[in-house]
Image (spheres, helix red, strand yellow):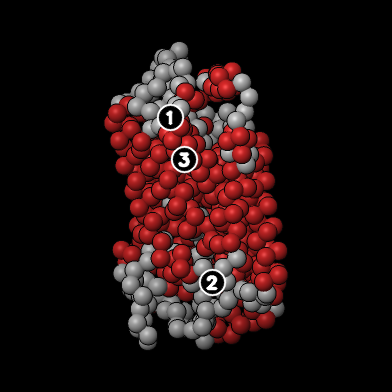
Amino acid sequence: MGSSGRLARRDDSETGSEADESAVWEPPHFTIPDHLIPAEFFIPFVRTPRPGEESKNASIITVFAIWNTMMGTSILSMPWLVEQSGFISSMLTFVAMGLVCVFTAYRVLTMQARLRIPPPTHDFQNIMRDVLSKHWEYFGILFSVAVLLGAMLVYWVLMTNFLYRTVDFFYDLAIGNFSKYDVNATVIHGAYCPENVVVEVLEAATSAVGEESFYDKMWNAQTTPLFLVLLLYPLLNIKSPTFFTKFTGMGTISVLYMIIFVTTKSVQFGINVSFTDVAAQDYVQLFRPNFPVAMGTLSLAMFIHNCICRIMESNQHQENNVRDLFIAYFLVFLTYLYIGLLFFVAWPFAKSCIQDNFLDNFLGTDPMSIGARIFLFFQMCTVFPLLGFMIRAQLMTFIYSTTYPGPGRVLALNTAVVIACVAVAVFYPHIGELLRFSGAFCGMAWIFTFPCVTYLVGTYRRGRLRWPAALLHSGLVVLGVVNLILQFVVKTD
């Protein structure tokens, strides 16, 4: 094919020296293709460069941009992952998935320099086109869209949860009725075990009221997703939602708040762990066969492969790209592990009570959880239009060669996305399941297959493929397929 000839001509001019092989490729300045997402969608908002000024960021900004991009909604499921996987097996899974993800992200970041592909083809989807075929580029775009759509589904479920509980609390505050928060169960610092009280609460509320009030008919878990349409659908149809990039720093603030939240609650709870007494309420299993649940979710939680080249292009010192990538992944690993393990070992009730959104383990009257829900709701409202724009930019360019092919087509796309979000929020509002299946499906492509296959084919054509590398990269491809299959085999509690 044409791309292989291009690589062959490049190889003919190589000296083969060790110095050339280790040289870092420096991307030139060029016009960004429409399907590439501008770096400001990921870089925390700082000062806008003056006309003619080069937009570059220090390593610390780049590191936190990567950290901020990966710190998504999955952070709320980390304690649940530890409970599902077992204490030790969850830590092993976190380490293993962290190593796999950072390795394949490193492959994506250094692929152009490694394979000596001439500029300006620096985006990984274009690299797949040059090394493999244009069809692989299309697969990259479609799976990238699938990742974004999965994130939008989870966002809509969480925003529904946060909006419903917040409005419900302030309504009860206004009318002075807090009887529904009397769960008739042990409550420790605002936390309780929902498994034992859901039926009691519903029965108590029904007997106390006699029949549903107008408010209860209009405002409930099934109607709240429809009210969200009034707020978010107009934002999705903005032609260029770059205004919302000014709020990208809110992601960092929200994660810091969640760290403070978990730390504060854990100090209040104390350590509640028993490794030996099976009959104890706080008994902890060291190993559980459900660890593939964590593999699927972490495939999404540590996913940044489709935009890492765009983020790193804005790094001021390109020679530090690899170092900054590894630092960022280490921070992501520490953050997830800290949130997951600390909340898990401190949880004062049966560990099986931990929800896939740990905020659901707290009463609606708990001040810190109220603050978390309000803050996360507004933060997600600013990110949601950006996710929608990314889907539009990649999908519309793929089909129509422009990011805005007309209001009719854009409205049709956004309508389909919103209908899918509402349907999931109403009929299947389980973020743990959504995260693990979407993570395993898209991770199979972007984390395991695309980087490894591109590397294998590219190095083979250059005559530099060795059997240890072939075995390693082929094994990762198989692991990605196995990870997806296991999600259908393993059932969550």
Residue 64: % across, % down:
36, 59
Q: Which residue is mark 2?
A: 240
Looking at the picture, which amino acid does disc 3 mark? Answer: Thr
Of the 4 image quadrants, the one containing the N terminus is bottom right
Dot 1 crowding, Cα within 10 Å, few <14, some 14–19, many 20+: few
Q: Which mark is residue 176?
A: 1
> Number of callouts in the render?
3
Q: CA distance from mark 1 to mark 2?
A: 43 Å
Tell me the element at label 1.
Answer: loop
| Residue 293 appears in the picture as rendered | yes
Q: Which residue is mark 3?
A: 166
Tell me the element at label 2.
Answer: loop
Q: Residue at x 48, y 53 (%)?
A: 380
Q: Residue at x 51, y 83 (%)?
A: 31
Q: CA distance from mark 1 to mark 3?
A: 15 Å
Dot 3 crowding, Cα within 10 Å, few <14, some 14–19, many 20+: many
Q: CA distance from mark 3 to mark 2?
A: 30 Å
